[in-house]
Amino acid sequence: MHSPSRRLVLAAGAASLAAPLLSYAQDVFPSKPLRMVVPFPPAGAADFLGRAVGERMAQSLGQQVLIENRSGAGGNIGTQAAAQGDREGYTLLLTGVPFAVNRFLFRSLPFDPERDFDPIALIATVPNLMIVPADSPANTVEEFIAMARKRPGQINFASIGNGTSLHLAGAQFNTATKLDMVHVPYKETGTANADLMAGRVDVMFQTISAAAGLVRGNKVKALAITSDVRVPAFASVPTLREAGVDLVTVGWFGLFVPAQVPQARKAVLEQQALAAVRDPALSARIADSGCIPRPMDGKTFEAFIDGETKRLGEVVRSAGIVAS
């Protein structure tokens, strides 16, 4: 039989042994499914990347990554929903260019991009193809510019909405070439593509995924690609720089978490996101979709966002772009 003092010593010893076990149990992450908010509609590049990366992360983490499409208001609805998510690392946001430019397009936002989020990793960049109708007299960028200069204010370019990456690409091309093209915003890709094929608009900077079938079916012509390098899927299509226009402009998508997530958990998510994008099989899938895998850690991604915010903010201001 133990004395009271002996019982206290044993109890204290048991508690000291249990404490590390309890602490370890509390630190297991993730211990339940994660939620990835994609503030864009299903079937687009963002949705594809979210599902592809989420699936690969789920395999490594041992927990599901559930995709939640919350589109609307140029990405603001889904981004706000993510900002209001948990602070334990179970809410992710996969977004892109709107994260950098919406602060310039809207009078106010229901969230603060810098205060409310921490970057985790850049996933991929998304170059655009410069496409024209199949019967356009222009077969090269040089010929298109010459044609447009003969018709100032009469050449129009389509996009899927004010302030979208496609609009910004056209606006930057306008500036770089000193043209006077007129912007025609559409609400969705299908109608914009249809009007381009019919010749009701003259040119569009369209994502590869949305333009590939049209180009391969000879329904439109691809004059250039907006990335800094050619892409294997369209190896014969020159970059804008190769075509004589000093411009590189791409969309991009990356992962974020709400601010105040513990650093150790952010490190886990960053590691798993980068491992997913670097996986050869997934990297090939991303490339086949028309995106360029660009794994970038959170700190480097943050600096990238700062640069994009300054650069695209100037594009928005100089072109007088406002949200539609």
Image: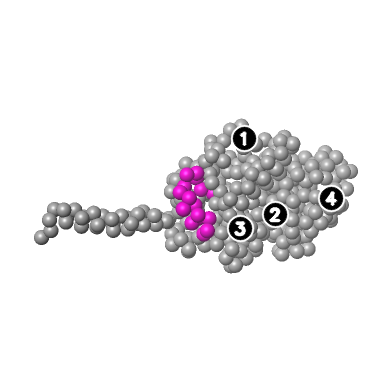
Quadrant, the C terminus? top right
Q: CA distance from mark 2 to mark 3?
A: 16 Å
Viewer-proximal residue, 2 or 93?
2
Tell me the crowding category of disc 2: few under 14, some 14 to 19, or many 20 or more residues within 10 angstroms, Cα based.
many
Q: According to the image, label 1 marks what residue?
A: 106
Q: According to the image, label 4 marks what residue?
A: 144
State the mark number for residue 237.
Answer: none
Q: According to the image, label 2 marks what residue?
A: 127
SS for tag 4? helix
Q: CA distance from mark 4 to mark 3?
A: 35 Å
SS for tag 2? strand
Tag nearer the camera, 2 or 3:
3
Quadrant, the N terminus? bottom left
Q: Are marks 2 and 1 in contact (CB under 8 Å)?
A: no
Tag nearer the camera, 2 or 4:
2
Please report whichever mark, 2 or 3, sits nearer to the chain's N-terminal start.
Answer: 2
Region in magenta: 254-272
As shown in the figure, which amino acid type bears the numbered disc 3? Pro
**Residue ranking furthest to the left:** 1
